[in-house]
Image (spheres, rainbow, N blue to C red):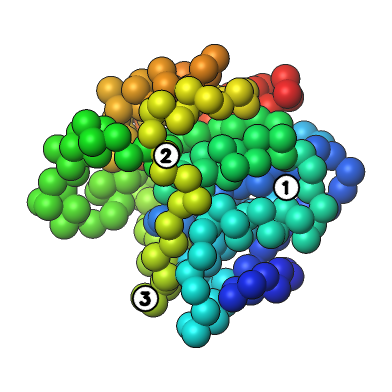
């Protein structure tokens, strides 16, 4: 697969090619482009051009250690420009959601639709940040990643899939990954300016971004749709790919 040579980084990406509307998948902090194995074939078969990439400091991407970390949304914009994608659908899970929101706020004309799954959206309102601190105390953060992020029903029913998810997590974030800051200071007030069609997906067993938290995010984005996935955890896209894919495909086909 190719690398995109961008300022300070070579981003590893996969591109299905084709003439369909482009869909860019943004992975979690516990993932890399390889986590979308259940999505890329399905979305490609549905006629979309699918792009997944390893963010700076993740997976196979190669960062220039002497350079500035920059903004993850700027890296995304540079990749979009290099590939000539205009406009595109952004499909993001967990930490990828903050990048997708930051990009959409900066380049609303380049985004056909936005899908935010099991994430905070990067909002930094004091009460929202405090809520996340309550939800994720130090003891919680000490749990193994698969306990925090993969729902109990899936861990019980699919130990092999859980193991594969853990392997991707262990190969995800590089030890020296640069800390990138968003271009925008994201708040609920700023989110009210979004006019991009948005779907918010939440696993109802998500311990990281539970429904009560995701409802606040959805309420801040005008016209957004919010859907709960029963018995799914923070990695709902991995745990229930058929249902997750159907919901996202139905949504982006409308836009």
Q: Residues within 10 Å of mark 1 (few under 14, many from 20)?
A: many
Q: Which residue is mark 3?
A: 175
Measured as percent of width and height from the top left, residue 50 is found at 72, 47
Measured as percent of width and height from the top left, residue 79 is found at 70, 59
Q: Earlier in the sequence, mark 1 or mark 3?
A: 1
Q: Residues within 10 Å of mark 3 (few under 14, many from 20)?
A: few
The residue tagged with tag 2: helix, strand or loop? loop
The structure residue drawn at horizontal position 53% and vertical position 57%, both measured from the top left corner, is: 72
Q: Is residue 89 left or right of residue 157?
A: right
Q: Is residue 5 left or right of residue 230?
A: right
Between 61 and 222, the one nearer to me in the picture: 222
The structure residue drawn at horizontal position 72% and vertical position 20%, both measured from the top left corner, is: 254
The residues bearing labels 2 and 1 have C-alpha atoms spaced at a distance of: 27 Å
Residue farthest to the left, as pictured: 139
The structure residue drawn at horizontal position 36% and vertical position 21%, both measured from the top left corner, is: 215
The residues bearing labels 1 and 3 have C-alpha atoms spaced at a distance of: 28 Å
Measured as percent of width and height from the top left, residue 159 is found at 36, 50
- Between disc 2 and disc 1, the foreground one is 2
Q: Which residue is mark 1?
A: 50
Disc 1 and disc 3 in contact, CB within 8 angstroms? no
Q: Is residue 250 above or below residue 82?
A: above
Q: Is residue 230 left or right of residue 242?
A: left
Q: Is residue 28 above or below residue 216?
A: below
- Between disc 1 and disc 3, the foreground one is 3
The structure residue drawn at horizontal position 47% and vertical position 45%, both measured from the top left corner, is: 184
The residue tagged with tag 3: helix, strand or loop? loop
Q: How many marks?
A: 3
Q: Is residue 173 above or below residue 106?
A: below
Q: Earlier in the sequence, mark 2 or mark 1?
A: 1
Q: Is residue 131 left or right of residue 61?
A: left
Q: Which residue is mark 2?
A: 186
């Amino acid at each position: 697969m190719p690398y995109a040579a961008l300022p300070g980084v070579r981003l590893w990406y996969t591109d299905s090619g084709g003439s369909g509307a482009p869909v860019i998948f943004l992975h979690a902090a516990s993932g890399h482009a390889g986590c979308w194995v259940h999505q890329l074939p399905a979305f490609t078969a549905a006629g979309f051009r699918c792009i997944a990439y390893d963010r700076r400091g993740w997976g196979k991407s190669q960062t220039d250690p002497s350079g500035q970390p920059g903004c993850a949304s700027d890296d995304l914009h540079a990749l979009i420009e290099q590939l000539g994608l205009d406009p595109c659908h952004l499909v993001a899970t967990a930490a990828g959601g903050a990048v997708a929101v930051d990009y959409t706020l900066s380049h609303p004309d380049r985004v056909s639709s936005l899908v935010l799954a099991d994430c905070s959206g990067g909002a930094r309102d004091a009460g929202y940040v405090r809520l996340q601190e309550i939800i994720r105390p130090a003891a919680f953060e000490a749990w193994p990643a698969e306990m925090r992020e993969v729902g109990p029903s899936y861990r019980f029913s699919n130990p092999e899939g859980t193991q594969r998810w853990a392997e991707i997590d262990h190969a995800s974030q590089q030890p020296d990954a640069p800390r990138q800051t968003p271009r925008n200071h994201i708040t609920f007030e700023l989110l009210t300016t979004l006019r991009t069609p948005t779907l918010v997906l939440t696993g109802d067993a998500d311990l990281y971004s539970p429904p009560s938290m995701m409802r606040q995010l959805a309420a801040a984005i005008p016209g957004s749709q919010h859907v709960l996935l029963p018995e799914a955890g923070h990695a709902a896209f991995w745990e229930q790919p058929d249902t997750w894919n159907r919901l996202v495909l139905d949504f982006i086909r409308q836009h």
